[in-house]
Image: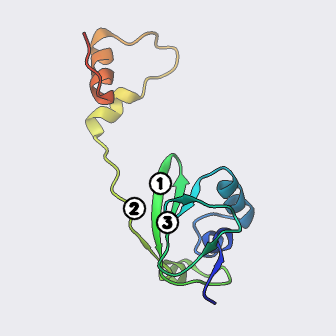
């Protein structure tokens, strides 16, 4: 087998829980093959780069092998290489982002911290 559907491959390597979720992700534009938006029926081959948007972030997977059926997690990991870049997270800024509902407007200090986090200049 030299090619297979991308939705079947994502399901087989355990990136999504069901094939229908993989199809829905492709329809929503959350799946790209080699930088091009892919339909669920798009063909994926060994050596391709598949990007899958999960929880607002892209997972970048390099296809090593194609498997026709869903297998266990240890076998599935052998079929791809995860080349996702590290997410930049700063624990000090994480506390600034979260504000409980009903606490009102941010203070001047919190607003400046939010502006700095977003890369804006505060006046």
The circle on residue 58 is 1
Residue at position x 38%, y 13% from top?
A: 106
Locate residue 9, reporting x and y percent: 62, 74
For numbered disc 1, what is the local secondary structure? strand
Q: Is residue 95 above or below residue 4?
A: above
The residue tagged 2 is: 84
Q: Tell me the quarter of the image containing the C terminus.
A: top left
Dot 1 or dot 2: first in sequence order is: 1
Describe the colour scheme in one phrase. rainbow
For numbered disc 2, what is the local secondary structure? loop
Dot 2 or dot 3: first in sequence order is: 3
Locate residue 39, reporting x and y percent: 68, 61
For the residues carrying marks 1 and 3, which lies nearer the camera in this image? 3
Q: Are marks 1 and 2 in contact (CB under 8 Å)?
A: yes
Q: Report, in whole angstroms, how far the alpha carbon at label 1 lies from the one at label 2.
A: 7 Å
Residue at position x 63%, y 76% from top?
A: 12
The circle on residue 3 is none
Q: Is residue 76 above or below residue 86?
A: below
């Amino acid at each position: 087998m030299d090619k297979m559907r991308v939705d079947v491959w994502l399901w087989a390597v355990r990136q999504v829980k069901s094939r229908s979720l993989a199809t829905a992700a492709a329809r929503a534009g959350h799946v790209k093959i080699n930088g091009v938006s892919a339909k669920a029926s798009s063909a994926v081959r060994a050596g391709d780069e598949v990007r899958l948007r999960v929880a607002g972030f892209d997972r970048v997977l390099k296809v090593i092998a194609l498997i026709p059926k869903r297998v266990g997690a240890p076998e599935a990991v052998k079929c791809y290489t995860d080349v996702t870049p590290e997410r930049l997270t700063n624990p000090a800024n994480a506390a600034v982002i979260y504000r409980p509902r009903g606490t009102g407007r941010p203070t001047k200090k919190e607003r400046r911290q939010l502006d700095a986090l977003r890369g804006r200049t505060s006046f």
